[in-house]
Image: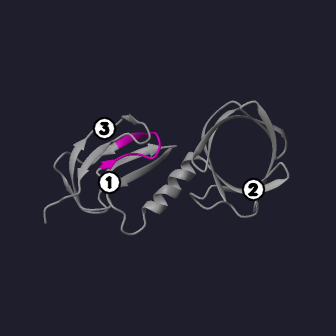
Amino acid sequence: MMEVTLLSKEGNHVKVALDEKVYDVDICMLEKNVYSIIHKGNSYNVELTRKNATVPPTPGGGQGYRANLNYSVYDIDILDSHAKYMRMRRHKGAENVAQANTLTPPMPCKIVKVYVKPGDKLKAGDSVLTMEAMKMQSNYKVSADCVIKEVLVKEGDNVMANQTMVTVDTQTEK
């Protein structure tokens, strides 16, 4: 299965990641479910069909499609940035996830509320801040006991993906 992530779209110009490799392409719909894709001067016609149109996609799961290209069939999962974020959050919820020393958002967001200040001692599961991305608010929580070292954002700030918002020290005294 190939993972396709929509990174940006302006008119017919689209930036996508196919299994983490980024492509700039021009896409034009020729007819229902048939698209012309131009990449580096080469033109490709692709037919996309939903794998199971009667079942809605699961939250964070993206849209499952079958792509017919050059007499070959590919199963793909198309993720917009919201679906990718939800998938990432679901996987981060796994047990034994180590707490990073920097807290960064997976996508551009706006800081709605900051709950901590330098020196605050947090327990695993405590909220650090609330951020808004794609009209959805999420609480950023720590996954392990830690102490806040720096808070580099304030309420109302617009933050880029992977920009450091808060630094923490995971070496807390017992």
Helix, strand or loop at label 3? It is loop
Task: Estimate the x, y position of residue 168 in percent, counting from the top left.
Answer: 24, 50
What mark, if any, has residue 147 been given in the picture?
Answer: none
- Calculate the distance from the C-alpha at mark 2 to the C-alpha at mark 3: 43 Å
Residue in the foreground of this view, choosing between 126 and 67: 67
Alpha carbon separation for disc pair 3 and 1: 17 Å
| Tally of numbered tags | 3
**Earlier residue among tags 1 and 2:** 2
User: Which of disc 3 and disc 2 is earlier in sequence?
Assistant: 2
Name the amino acid type tagged 1: Ala
- In this rendering, the answer to whether 99 lies above or below 94 is above
Q: Secondary structure at mark 1?
A: loop
Residue span colored magenta: 102-112
Image marks 3 and 1: residues in contact by CB distance under 8 Å: no
Residue type highlighted by circle 2? Tyr
Q: Distance of mark 1 from mark 2, alpha carbons?
A: 36 Å
Look at 42% across and 51% down and name the residue there.
Answer: 138
Pointer 3 residue:
153
- The residue tagged 1 is 100
Judged from the image, the secondary structure of the residue bearing numbered disc 2 is strand
Residue on which the image places disc 2: 74
Residue at 29% across / 45% down in the picture? 166
**What residue lies at 28% left-to-right and 51% top-to-bottom?**
101
Comparing 118 with 156, the one in front is 118
Image quarter of the N terminus = bottom right
Q: Assess disc 1: are there few (<14), some (14-19) or many (≥20) residues with their C-alpha within 10 Å of its C-alpha.
A: some
